[in-house]
Image (cartoon, rainbow, N blue to C red):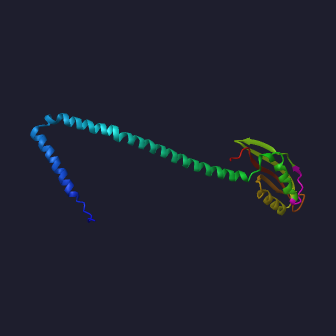
Amino acid sequence: MSAPQNFDFNVYVKAATEEVNIVLGTLREKGAERFGRAIGGAIFLVFAAYVGVYLPPQKKASSLQAQIDRARQMADYGTQFKDLRDQLNGAYNGLPALNDREQWLSNSVRDSLLVGGLEPENFTPVKEQELNGLIFQTSSVSLTLRFSEFYDWLLRIENAKPLMHMNTLDLAKKNDKLGFNGATCDITTVIPKMRFQ
């Protein structure tokens, strides 16, 4: 087995330089006109090799790179869409279902009052407003109660699952009943008409 030989780059540079010098010397000595046909053929072959051999793979590589970039961008958009959809579904999961639309808010408000032993003086039917695929339901309740009872009822409303919210509140002391307050509240919930899969 022979020992590996060291590669000497200078030898190849020197040989290439000598070849170029020979070609240039011959051109000076014989004249460029004499080699015009050979030079023209060489230029044509270099151009044909560039156009026929080098450019098609470059165009194909550029086209493939553009497709890869588009696919990567679509994958990024897909991931963003899934994240946003999951966030929206997470928010929607805390809201009443569409098939509970008829009685859910009325029943939930009534149950929250019954737990505290509260009697409404006025309980208006649910009003609906539809906007951008969401159904906003509101019901008004008027009652007389102590502040501690009101506070407990407010906590029950605001912590209810599915969600409902005390949208407006008018609370005033009752002059004719010592220690009692008159409360008028609008209680709201939102029902999405469509949930994303």
Instruction: Name the residue at the front extreme.
Output: 1
Q: Identify the residue at horizontal 38%, vertical 39% (top origin).
A: 56
Start-end of magenta stretch: 115-122
Q: Identify the residue at horizontal 17%, vertical 47% (top origin).
A: 20
Q: Identify the residue at horizontal 30%, vertical 36% (top origin).
A: 48
Which image quarter: residue 175? Answer: bottom right
Whether 76 is among the magenta residues is: no
Q: Nearer the viewer, residue 120 or 80?
A: 80
Which quadrant is the N terminus positioned in? bottom left
Compared across the picture, whether 131 is left or right of 101 comes to left
Residue 91 place in picture, x, y as percent: 69, 52
Residue 174 appears in the figure:
no
Residue 194 place in picture, x, y as percent: 72, 44
Q: Nearer the viewer, residue 175 or 184?
A: 184
Q: Main secondary structure of the magenta part?
A: loop
Instruction: Name the residue at the left extreme.
Output: 29
Residue 115 appears in the figure:
yes
Whether 117 is among the magenta residues is: yes
Residue 190 place in picture, x, y as percent: 75, 48
Indicate whether 30 appears above or below 186: above
Which image quarter: residue 35? Answer: top left
Q: Nearer the viewer, residue 51 or 130?
A: 51
